[in-house]
Amino acid sequence: MWRSRITRWLHGKREKLWWAVGGGVALTVVLLSCSNFETNRTLLAPPSIPGAEFVGSEECATCHEEITRDFRTATHARLKAQGDNAKNIGCESCHGPGSLHVSSGGAARTIVNPRRSPETCFQCHLEVRAKFQLPHRHPVLEGKVSCADCHNPHKGMAIKGGGTNLPQAVRGGGIELLGQNDTCFQCHTAQRGPFVFEHEALREGCVTCHSPHGSVNQRMLTARDANLCLKCHFQEQRTDGRLYIGDSDHTTRLQQGTCWSAGCHEAIHGSQVNGHFRY
């Protein structure tokens, strides 16, 4: 009797196993089918210009030779599909169909200029659109700052001053490489220095403490309180209950406000007079 029970139990387990395997295969087929279906769909449409037709990137090269020549080095160039399905998609995927622009000899307002409006960029960068709805942000939506002020759409890395670039501007052979901070310093000149006492966080990059597209915190900070500083500055809770940061007792100081607003470290980017970043 016990043998028959074991046999029935094993048979039930085997049947459940086949159901699990079969279900997994079926799910895989469905997901692959959905995946193939998704990749064959047109997810985004290029900007439209009433009465204009696509002419192809080769036509753009007749006037914008340098831009089209260097575009092969651009991050955005990786997005360009190959073959007949994308033969008209290149420059016009961001600038719209160019027939009117060509026939008019390059007249203004006959082509989409993303510098005038970020909407062209937002077609792909949906998450960035959301960040620009936050209370503290760069004035891109107001037209005071353009995406192209910080990004290279036509040549090299899309993010100016990426990790592979030198920390300082280097000019030679017609190429200008900007470190990440230098991109910010183009507008935020007071934070450039040089400082006698430099905050080492600057070497990590401005985006260590700031969210460049937008934040819920003032000054576009990634955190609103002392936790911003404690990401780098080690804290120690001693046996007597005192809180030390570095070699200094901060037990009562952190209760007075943030590190930069409590009257302790006001010159947070760097100081000319004090190693504790005081004015």
Image: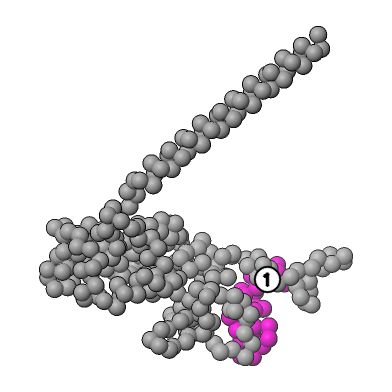
Q: Is residue 82 left or right of residue 103?
A: right
Q: Residues within 10 Å of mark 1 (few under 14, many from 20)?
A: few
- Residue farthest top in this picture: 1
Magenta stretch: give its range. Answer: 250-279
Q: Is residue 256 visible?
A: no
What residue does disc 1 label? 232
Q: What is the magenta segment's predominant secondary structure? A: loop
Residue type pointed to by label 1: Cys
**x then y, percent, for residue 62:** 20, 74
In this orientation, which residue lies closer to the viewer: 105 or 205? Answer: 105
What is the tally of numbered marks visible in this picture? 1
Location of residue 152 in the rendering, given as x and y in whole percent from the top left corner: 39, 72
Quick one: quadrant of the C terminus? Answer: bottom right
Q: Nearer the viewer, residue 19 or 113?
A: 19
In the picture provided, is 147 more to the left or to the right than 55?
A: right
Q: Secondary structure at mark 1?
A: loop
Give the residue at x 56% y 28%.
22
In the figure, 171 relative to 163: above or below? below
Residue positioned most to the right: 239
Q: Is residue 74 magenta?
A: no
* Quadrant occupied by the N terminus: top right
Which percent across, then down, holds residue 136? 47, 65
Is 272 magenta? The answer is yes
Q: Would residue 159 be found to the left or right of residue 250 on screen?
A: left
Find residue 21 and report its image quarter: top right
- Answer with left or right where residue 115 lies relative to residue 75: left
Residue at horizontal 42 percent and vertical 83 percent from the top: 176
